[in-house]
Image (spheres, grey):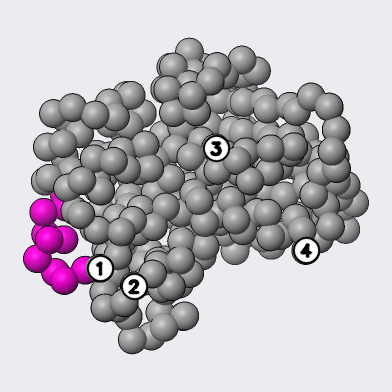
Amino acid sequence: MRKVSNEMPIGIFDSGVGGLTVMKEIMKLLPEEDILYIGDTARVPYGTRSPETVSRYSLENARFLMSKGIKVLVVACNTSSAVSLALLREKFPVSVIGVVEPGARAAVERSILKRIAVIGTETTIKTGSYERAIREIDNSIEVSGIACPLFVPIIEEGWLEGDVVNLTVEKYLSSIRYNNVDTLVLGCTHYPMIKNVIEKFVQLPLIDSAVETAKEVKSVLEKKDILCKSKGEVSRNFFVSDSPEKFAYVGEKFLGHKILNILKIELGG
């Protein structure tokens, strides 16, 4: 078993900028922690890929982060969490935290009518990962899934408001208004970037898996007694597989500050 220390960084990966929503929430809860982030921008989106391909990409991301000496691995991608979480937990000797389970728990706690809707990528919805996770907690809950494949590329383009986003949200989510749903799960970590648009249209409580995942990370680090002790300057480093300038442009708009330590890397092979 690999020795894990308090000073090691948290490792996070996603297919692109969406996982920055998870990173942002982790930074709020754990401001003293060093973080390494991978955005696999050369191969985004994952949500239209086969499960086999998603698993391969996830393993490549995880191997890179493990080579940097991380103490916990955060899979900040619903598609990867839905498809490859068990595989990653089997392969790597650190705690592996996905985004599906924390979001599912929060949705069950919030729902009164026991009618929950989940929006996500095609792969996340097809796997039924949220439905299984929710029904493992409460089998009486009715769960409906809606695939929204255009949300990720729209967000990756930096279109976070305006006609394109408004019309796409309306196209995908109109049916929710007529299904007596009382809770909506944002089943993709990109989606909080257009959270205000979605919330205004559906007028329902939203479950943000990024917020819930950050709570889970803090809990795991506390239980394992590997929270970072108070120290000096905090390190936040970013790795992308393509287009670092574009990643920085979109990421900075969301994080609200400059992304300085960014490096293009090769994954796979």
Judging by the rendered image, the residue that carries numbered circle 4 is: 223
Seen at 53% across and 20% down, the residue is 257
Q: CA distance from mark 2 to mark 4?
A: 28 Å
Q: CA distance from mark 3 to mark 2?
A: 26 Å
* The label number, if any, that marks residue 111 in the structure image: 2
Q: Secondary structure at mark 3?
A: helix
Judging by the rendered image, the residue that carries numbered circle 1 is: 182
Q: Secondary structure at mark 4?
A: helix
Q: Say if the magenta span includes residue 26.
A: no
Examine the image and state in which quarter residue 27 appears. Answer: top right
For marks 4 and 1, the one nearer the N-term is: 1
Asked if residue 241 lies left or right of residue 17, the reply is: right
Q: Please tell me which residue lies in front, 216 or 49.
A: 216
Residues at marks 4 and 3 touching, judged by CB atoms closer than 8 Å = no
Seen at 90% across and 51% down, the residue is 3
Answer above or below: position of 61 versus 240: below
| Residue range (magenta) | 172-181
